[in-house]
Image (tube, grey):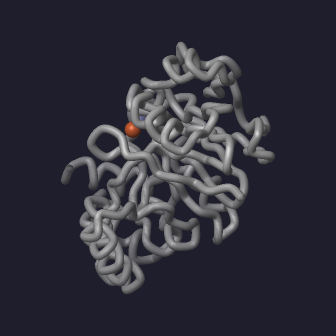
Amino acid sequence: MIEIIPIPAFEDNYIWLIRNASFAAAVDPGDADPVMEYLQQHNLRLTAILITHHHGDHCGGAEELRRIYDCPVYGPRLEKIQATTQTVAENDIVSLPGLDTAFHVIDVPGHTRGHVAYYGIHSLFCGDTLFACGCGRLFEGTPEQMQASLAKLAALPDETRVFCAHEYTLANIRFARIADPGNITLQEREIRERQTRAQGLPTLPSTIALEKNTNPFLRWDNSHLIAAASQFAGRPLHSPASIFAAIRQWKDKLD
Ligand code: ZN
Ligand code: FE
């Protein structure tokens, strides 16, 4: 049986470990130490590393883990990541040795130029592209690219579990409530997620259904969000990319 375990790292990162009784694969190991500690404690062998993008908090521990476990490191084709042994891009399939499972690669440029996501076993590993009630900042890509990337993720099945790389949920909800104040599902979510955090638990994984209903960065079709984005921009907005861009700028201004 496969389990997906959060390994907290740094301030608010999660390194996700896909494991069964004997083997494991790590997604975005920014730090090797907590991963090694978990593997040793549970007597697991690391058989693959998946990297979503080149930022240090996502790939900083990959080289050390690769040296110790001699496993393949999958990383985006468009980004220079020293640890990568196999580059991947849209439509590639990555199979995880010992875990009897495979993931589809989805190109999701926006946060960075070559950012990829991994989708399989009803689970999405989306790095810094989609967050619970939020999305990554646009460091290298355009709003058009990011909106198209998010649209691809939103098109995955509703029940898809969303494994984001950071615990940003409560801060994101604070902004979501400003942008989408009438959203009851969002208000209910805030109550739930506050309780979860108060118990010291991760708010992740989320689901695609929940994000479509509560994440302002996926709601470019919603009349309330269109009105709010237009008001922020000071002119009527129509295209999904322009609505997304306004909401992203709005949050950047408040952060
Ligand atoms: Zn990042
Ligand atoms: Fe990050």
Q: Is residue 253 left or right of residue 227?
A: left
**x 54%, y 45%: residue:** 42
Q: Quadrant of residue 105?
A: top right
**x 42%, y 31%: residue:** 30
Whether 190 is drawn above or below 8: the answer is below
Q: Is residue 23 visible?
A: yes
Pinpoint residue 204: horizontal percent, then vertical percent. 45, 61
Whether 163 is drawn above or below 57: the answer is below
**Residue 134 or 5: which is nearer the viewer?**
5
Pinpoint residue 58: horizontal percent, then vertical percent. 45, 32
Whether 29 is drawn above or below 230: the answer is above
Q: Is residue 230 visible?
A: no
Pinpoint residue 102: horizontal percent, then vertical percent. 77, 45
Whether 55 is drawn above or below 128: the answer is above
Q: Quadrant of ligand 1?
A: top left
Q: Quadrant of residue 191?
A: bottom left
Q: Quadrant of residue 46?
A: top right
**x 30%, y 57%: residue:** 233
Pinpoint residue 149: horizontal percent, then vertical percent. 58, 47
